[in-house]
Amino acid sequence: MEDFKSNFDISAGVTYLNTPGNGLIPQGVKQWRREFEQEFYSSGTDLRDRQQDFINTVKQELSSFFNGSPEHTFLTPNFSFAYNAIINLLPPTFTYLLLEDEYPSLAYPLIAQRRAHHSIPVTADVETQLMEAVTYYSPDVLVISITQYISGLQIDSNFFKKLKHQHPELIIIADGTQFLGTQVFDFAQSGIDAIAASGYKWLLSGFGNGFLMLNETLQQPLNERVSDIPPPTVPMWAGKTTLHTFFEPGHQDCIAFGTLRESLRFMQRQGMQRIETHLQTLTQYAYNALSQRGWLLPHIQQRDQRSPLINVQIDPRLYPKLQNHKIMCFPRGTGIRIGLHLYNNPTDIDRLIDLIEKQ
């Protein structure tokens, strides 16, 4: 197994398994951030006057990384901002479908904005259930986290294309926060109409950065929704469309978005295929060990699709003891949630299991 751990600052004795809560920033990216911030706030620099050019480079590299379009890519402070903005732009008469126990930032805006919606339980055959629910309820929009934040259930990557083929009129909005950064992802070929994410988890980018990508199919009706609003004409907003005023209404933090860009560059240098292979191998190792002990959720164990976000079915009250032994994780649902990323290896899993079995 490849060693990516040397690229991260992990204190002696710490086993870091809390990427689903927040990921670690690579050493080189932290160094870039320190140097850039010092120069950015220097009295003699013109960096602050070239912020828009800098933001444009982030969009270019971000869209290239996920095979999107820079014209349809928007930089936002986090997933929640992007998601709320897009829900606000869609017609209030639209109906929505989602899974039960979804991430609150995805589910609650539908309640707060009084949008009609239906939800279905998460089961081992969730893709089949979603397909049947779309046929039964005929929603206008499916909103879904590709990887569920509590259970770690990951939607089959081919499902969205199949769903879109059978229901081309359905709008699919995906939360990629617990997914992007774990494997190769091609937005243009995904079948998804809009994907948004925060960068502070698996994208290893710290706080304050996120993004939204739209495909042409969704961009067109959104543009029609704002067609009666005159576009910006002031010189300082040259190049901004009306949609930009919804998704990017104010200043953008060059340090936060620069951190996202640098982390993407780091992952690109490592190679996303190598990262994916590393995580698949490590995840399989963890699943084998946890399955032997009966520590996996039943509906997760029944699935072939597996994610590096795992809810270990042990008493959540063990959490303080794990913390005392510097195993960084978090209680979620009926167990303890862990995440396996570049800086993890089989030794981390062995240490977790050994400590649990000693309790």
Image: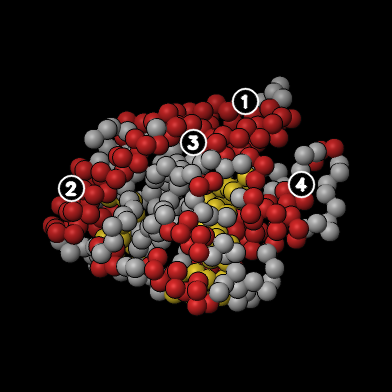
User: SS of the residue at dot 2?
Assistant: helix
- Residue 261: % across, % down: 54, 35
Q: Pick whichever, 326 or 116, lies toward us.
A: 116
- Secondary structure at badge 1 equals helix
Query: Does label 2 or label 1 sit earlier along the sequence?
Result: 1
Mark pair 2, 1: CA separation: 44 Å
Q: Residue furthest top?
A: 44
Q: Is residue 262 above or below residue 305?
A: above
The amino acid on which the numbered mark 4 sits, given as a three-letter code, is Thr
**Rendered location of residue 346, percent (x, y):** 21, 43
Q: Residues within 10 Å of mark 1 (few under 14, many from 20)?
A: some
In the shown orientation, is residue 46 left or right of residue 312? right
Circle 4 sits in a helix, a strand or a loop, which is it? loop
Which one is earlier in the sequence, the residue at label 4 or at label 1?
A: 1
Name the residue tied to disc 1.
Answer: 39
- Find numbered disc 3 in the image and state the secondary structure of the residue it sits on: helix
Please name the residue that numbered disc 3 is placed on. Answer: 264
